[in-house]
Image (tube, rainbow, N blue to C red):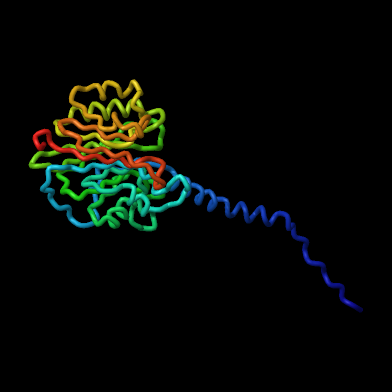
């Protein structure tokens, strides 16, 4: 008598993937929350002490102060290629430079772009973040200096967009025993532009001269929002007579100083020009 083998109990193979998906769903949701949290942009803490890199600045002994401002566009030119060597070349010679659209070192712990530029130029540098992303200071401004800095005071500018966080940074250096106040800014180009521009204008006019305002104002010379500032009796606008700079949005303005030279340097390192100026005290001539 032969034994009959029992058939194995049928399984519902269609249900197994669903069960696996249900089991993995909490982990997928957790990963999504973590990624969403890391990708979200939040304002940087302006009270964190500033970390300087590079050699200690040396006190100047001349009668000229060389100032530069450059929106480096993250080191990328119109061709989309990242090349900080081009950025360095376009930035040129200066004593103090104010940079916009500077990337931080990121979660990998690498050096920020201000630090890389300072390293190439062998001068002191500081990354001044405005934005945190991926749990680190991600984006902001840079300060490069060959001169000792007496003060660096950061003031976040009000914003309503929930991103594109901006700040004004007040720096002081010495020129022939006189303190020169340098206000570096990067004004929003959308909803918050007019409000930030008004605040920055008031801050600059309230500074005791000699004083310099520089940066990307995202505002052209014929904008009525800028007319009151340009019409102030002691404000010097060196770019006003430069034909090549017509319609510009990157600025250097001064009070209580004479402009000796002004350069509006276009190139392939960024979608912005580098602007450089040499200033002296009125009595230095």
35, above or below 279, in the image: below
Q: Position of residue 127 (x, y in %)?
A: 29, 48
Up the image or down, 236 lies above or below 260; here it is above
Percent position (x, y) of residue 125? 25, 51
**Residue at x-position 22% and y-position 45%:** 96
Q: Decide if residue 148 is on the left or right side of residue 26.
A: left
Q: Quadrant of the N terminus?
A: bottom right
Residue 2: in sight, yes or no?
yes
| Towards the viewer: 174 or 29 | 174
Tally the marks: 0
Q: Residue at (7%, 42%) from the top-left corner?
A: 177
Residue, far bottom: 1
Q: Residue at x 45, y 46 (%)?
A: 39
Decide if residue 130 is in sight here.
no
| Position of the C terminus by quadrant | top left
Is 105 left, or right, of 255 in this rendering? right
The residue lying at 29 percent from left, 30 percent from top is 241
Residue 70: x and y in percent read: 32, 42
Q: Nearer the viewer, residue 102 or 92?
A: 92
Measured from the top left, where is residue 140 in percent x and y? Answer: 34, 43
Q: Is residue 233 above or below residue 181?
A: above
Q: Quadrant of residue 203?
A: top left
Q: Quadrant of residue 155?
A: top left
Q: Is residue 143 left or right of residue 74?
A: left
Q: Which residue occupies the extreme right position in the image? A: 1
């Amino acid at each position: 008598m032969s034994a009959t083998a029992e058939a194995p109990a049928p399984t519902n193979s269609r249900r197994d993937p669903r069960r696996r998906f249900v089991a993995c769903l909490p982990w997928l949701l957790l990963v999504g929350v973590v990624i969403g949290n890391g990708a979200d942009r939040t304002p940087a803490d302006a009270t964190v002490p500033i970390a300087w890199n590079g050699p200690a600045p040396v006190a100047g002994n001349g009668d000229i102060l060389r100032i530069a401002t450059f929106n480096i566009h993250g080191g990328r030119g119109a061709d989309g290629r990242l090349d900080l060597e081009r950025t360095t070349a376009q930035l040129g010679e200066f004593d103090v430079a104010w940079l916009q659209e500077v990337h931080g070192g990121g979660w990998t712990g690498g050096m920020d772009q201000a630090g890389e530029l300072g390293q190439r130029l062998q001068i002191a540098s500081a990354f001044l973040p405005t934005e945190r992303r991926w749990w680190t200071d991600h984006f902001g401004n840079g300060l490069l200096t060959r001169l000792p800095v007496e003060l660096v005071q950061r003031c976040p500018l009000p914003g309503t967009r929930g991103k594109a966080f901006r700040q004004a940074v007040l720096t002081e250096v010495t020129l022939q025993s006189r303190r020169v106040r340098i206000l570096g800014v990067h004004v929003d180009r959308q909803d918050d532009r007019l409000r930030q521009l008004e605040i920055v204008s008031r801050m600059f006019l309230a500074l005791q001269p000699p004083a310099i305002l520089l940066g990307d104002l995202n505002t052209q010379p014929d904008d009525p929002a800028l007319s009151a500032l340009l019409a102030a009796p002691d404000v010097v606008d060196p770019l006003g007579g430069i034909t090549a700079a017509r319609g510009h949005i990157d600025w250097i303005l001064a009070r209580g100083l004479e402009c000796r030279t002004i350069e509006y340097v276009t190139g392939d390192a960024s979608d912005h020009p580098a602007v450089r100026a040499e200033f002296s005290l009125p009595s230095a001539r």
